[in-house]
Image: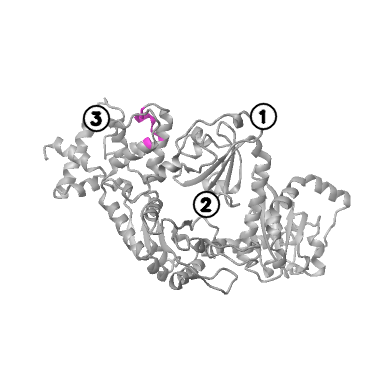
């Protein structure tokens, strides 16, 4: 557990104890369960019939398979901490506590002190209460993990909890109860809104759409979000309900909602986070949107795949070419490759190109975003686990990402976010070339080529104790840095190539000089990822017409205008202003100053001015220097 996470965890327990003291409870208090009358029980069943049916019929079969392997008990409670139903092994606790696990028992903090169900409701978040963390001594024979279930309005609809009396791997128990509650939440949203609305499933990679940890957006045909789950809010960084797709993503809503259901979609948020998405249309027959045929779109997946060769990574930039050729040579010999660079420079694209060019192109490429997996599940997801290895484990066990990559290439993106415990296990795998699944003593040989990536220096993570130095030197066989888009010498042909890939049929084959100038001289803080989305938005807004400057997104133009003193954006965007000549003179004066400082080195001067060499040559000709 990281230091700040541990501090937050201790704060939750301390705050709960303080509430218990304020309510007048003491540690020796033994509350008596108040069991409701049968009429009240019937009312509870009627009131929560949908929550009960979704939990039992759609989620618990997945979980029930492992109950025989673990002594634990699952409780479903309502938003007031009243138990609605229970499943599992009631032998986990003493006889005197059994009434508390029956339908109708209430676990509110005011009566039962600090406990998993009551405290989870109080803080509105998943919690785990160890034995001695219970405020009341009478509850200290049990360990509880609980997570709230939220409805479409972000109100708590219920709580799922797992109680045990054994010293099981509790981090896994908490992780699984979180996923289990998320599953219930997802299915409640699907049942309520799925028939009449578009469903957009989001995740960091396309391999994880079926995970309960996927984000879900339910939208009407105008692109307004009617309902969503907690995970969607986490991925997008805002409360998504009532937001519009055009506000959340850079792509136009018609392109999103009209995308093929059989092909995955790449979306980029307004905060420049790239997500994979899948679209599902309304299923209700009376819904006009479900009957309408989507407008045909280019097959972006196959089109992008065609440009994943080593030769298509650069169009004249020596730094990118060197990264690609050197990486391929050392990877072919089994040497691990570490790719660095800013977010959006194309690290994943490089990895896919290396895979296609390697002798393992017919074997799997398994890509894992280390920051996207809940910390408590990283080890089981990476290394796999045996059947019944921990509470919530699948009955058949799990192979894990490392064994899935056997004979192929494993790509660990955002490697710096991997928890320290998983780093230790990964180091052993790389040293001994064997994997030991969680809950097993048997080791399984693995043959993988390893590629890792990070967008921030790992040395700083080592200095602050968040990354192992020995693992760093193990994965850092060859370290290559992909240059930022603003520093690439082939920026102009790259822009034109990407435009050619995405343009609509009938649009001009080439961008106009004004649009090219605006694109070429932009600072591109989001790099190639941002460039692709700017082009796609402009193409969508142009709607078959030739792309003009005013088709470029507003946030792009705002970034462009922010480059005061660098380039005359007024001359590019709005020619005819009186101060154009003055700004042009300032630009030429600065160009000459930098060129002289670099002693005539054109490449160095272009980099310092953040312009292309062609633009620099043009200015020098205007100055009469060349």
Q: How far apart are marks 1 and 3 (CA)?
A: 59 Å
In the rendered structure, which disc, 2 or 1, sits on the residue that comes first in sequence?
2
Please, which residue is most extreme toward the right here? 38
Q: Mark 1 points at which residue?
A: 286
Instruction: Please state, as top left, top right, bottom left or bottom right, where the C terminus lies in the image.
Output: top left
- Residue placed at 68% from the left, 40% from the top? 192
Residue 580's tag is 3
Quick one: label 3, few (<14), some, or many (20+) residues within 10 Å?
Answer: some
Mark 2 near mark 1, Cβ–Cβ under 8 Å? no
Mark 1 near mark 3, Cβ–Cβ under 8 Å? no
Q: Does the magenta stretch include residue 451?
A: no
Q: Position of residue 568 (x, y in %)?
A: 26, 34
- Along the line of sight, which residue is nearer the eye, 449 or 376? 449
- Residue placed at 21% from the left, 50% from the top? 604
Closer mark to the observer between disc 1 and disc 3: 1
Q: Give the range drawn in magenta.
A: 546-558
Residue 467 sits above or below residue 263 on the image: below
- Label 2: element kind: helix
Closer mark to the observer between disc 2 and disc 3: 2
- Along the line of sight, which residue is nearer the eye, 1 or 166? 166
Please indicate, yes or no, whether residue 209 appears anywhere in the rendered image: yes
Q: Name the residue under label 2.
A: 207
- Residue placed at 21% from the left, 40% from the top? 614
Mark 2 near mark 3, Cβ–Cβ under 8 Å? no
- Label 3: element kind: helix
Q: How far apart are marks 2 and 1 (CA)?
A: 33 Å
- Residue placed at 38% from the left, 50% from the top? 346
Q: Where is residue 551 in the image (x, y as percent from the top left)?
A: 39, 30
* Image quarter of residue 625: top left
Majority SS type along the magenta span = helix
- Along the line of sight, which residue is nearer the eye, 589 or 163? 163
């Amino acid at each position: 557990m990281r230091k700040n996470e541990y501090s937050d965890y201790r704060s939750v327990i301390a705050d709960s104890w303080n509430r218990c003291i304020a309510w007048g409870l003491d540690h020796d208090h033994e509350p008596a369960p108040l069991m409701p009358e049968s009429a009240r029980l019937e009312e509870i069943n009627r009131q929560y019939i949908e929550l009960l049916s979704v939990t039992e019929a759609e989620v618990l079969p997945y979980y029930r398979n492992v109950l025989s392997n673990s002594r634990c008990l699952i409780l479903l409670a309502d938003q007031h901490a009243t138990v609605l139903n229970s499943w599992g092994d009631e032998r986990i606790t003493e006889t005197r506590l059994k009434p508390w696990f029956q339908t109708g028992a209430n676990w509110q903090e005011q009566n039962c002190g600090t406990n998993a169900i009551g405290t989870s409701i109080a803080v509105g978040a998943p919690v785990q209460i160890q034995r001695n963390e219970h405020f009341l001594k009478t509850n200290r024979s049990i360990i509880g993990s609980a997570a709230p279930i939220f409805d479409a309005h972000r109100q708590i609809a219920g709580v799922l909890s797992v109680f045990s009396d054994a010293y099981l791997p509790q981090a896994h128990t908490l992780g699984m109860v979180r996923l289990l509650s998320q599953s219930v939440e997802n299915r409640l949203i699907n049942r309520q809104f799925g028939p009449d609305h578009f469903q957009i499933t989001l995740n960091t990679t396309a391999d994880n759409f079926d995970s309960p940890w996927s984000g879900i957006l339910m939208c009407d045909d105008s692109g307004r979000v009617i309902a969503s789950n907690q995970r969607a809010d986490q991925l997008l960084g805002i409360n998504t309900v009532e937001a519009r797709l055009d506000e959340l993503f850079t792509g136009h809503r018609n392109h999103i909602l009209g995308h093929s259901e059989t092909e995955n979609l790449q979306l980029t948020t307004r905060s420049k986070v790239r997500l994979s998405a899948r679209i599902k249309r309304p299923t209700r027959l009376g819904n006009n949107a479900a009957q309408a045929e989507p407008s045909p779109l280019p097959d972006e997946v196959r089109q992008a795949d065609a440009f994943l060769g080593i030769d298509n990574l650069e169009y004249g930039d020596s730094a990118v070419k060197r990264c690609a050729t050197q990486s391929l040579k050392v990877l072919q010999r089994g040497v691990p490759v570490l790719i660095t660079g800013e977010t959006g420079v194309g690290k994943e694209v490089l990895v896919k190109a290396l895979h296609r060019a390697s002798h393992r192109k017919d074997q799997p490429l398994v890509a894992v975003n280390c920051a996207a997996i809940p910390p408590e599940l990283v080890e089981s997801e990476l290394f796999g686990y045996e059947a019944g290895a921990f509470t919530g484990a699948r009955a058949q066990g799990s192979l894990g990402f490392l064994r899935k990559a056997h004979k192929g290439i494993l790509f660990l993106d955002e490697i710096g976010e991997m928890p320290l415990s998983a780093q230790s296990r990964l180091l052993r795998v790389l040293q001994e070339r064997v994997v030991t699944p969680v809950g097993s003593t048997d080791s399984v040989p693995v043959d993988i080529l390893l590629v890792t990536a990070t967008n921030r220096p790992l040395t700083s993570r080592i200095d602050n104790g968040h990354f192992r130095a020995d693992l760093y030197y193990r994965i850092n066989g060859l370290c290559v840095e992909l240059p930022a888009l603003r520093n690439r010498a082939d920026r102009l042909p790259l822009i034109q190539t990407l435009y050619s890939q995405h343009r609509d049929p009938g649009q001009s084959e080439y961008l106009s000089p004004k649009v090219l100038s605006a694109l070429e001289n932009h600072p591109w803080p989001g790099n190639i990822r941002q460039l692709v989305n700017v082009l796609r938005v402009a193409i969508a807004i142009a709607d078959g017409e030739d792309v003009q400057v005013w088709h470029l997104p507003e946030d792009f133009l705002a970034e462009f205008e922010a480059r005061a003193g660098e380039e005359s954006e007024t001359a590019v965007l709005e020619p005819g202003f009186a101060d154009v000549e003055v700004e042009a003179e300032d630009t030429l004066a600065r160009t000459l100053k930098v060129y002289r400082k670099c002693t005539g080195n054109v490449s160095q001067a272009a980099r310092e001015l953040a312009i292309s060499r062609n633009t620099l040559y043009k200015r020098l000709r205007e100055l009469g220097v060349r």
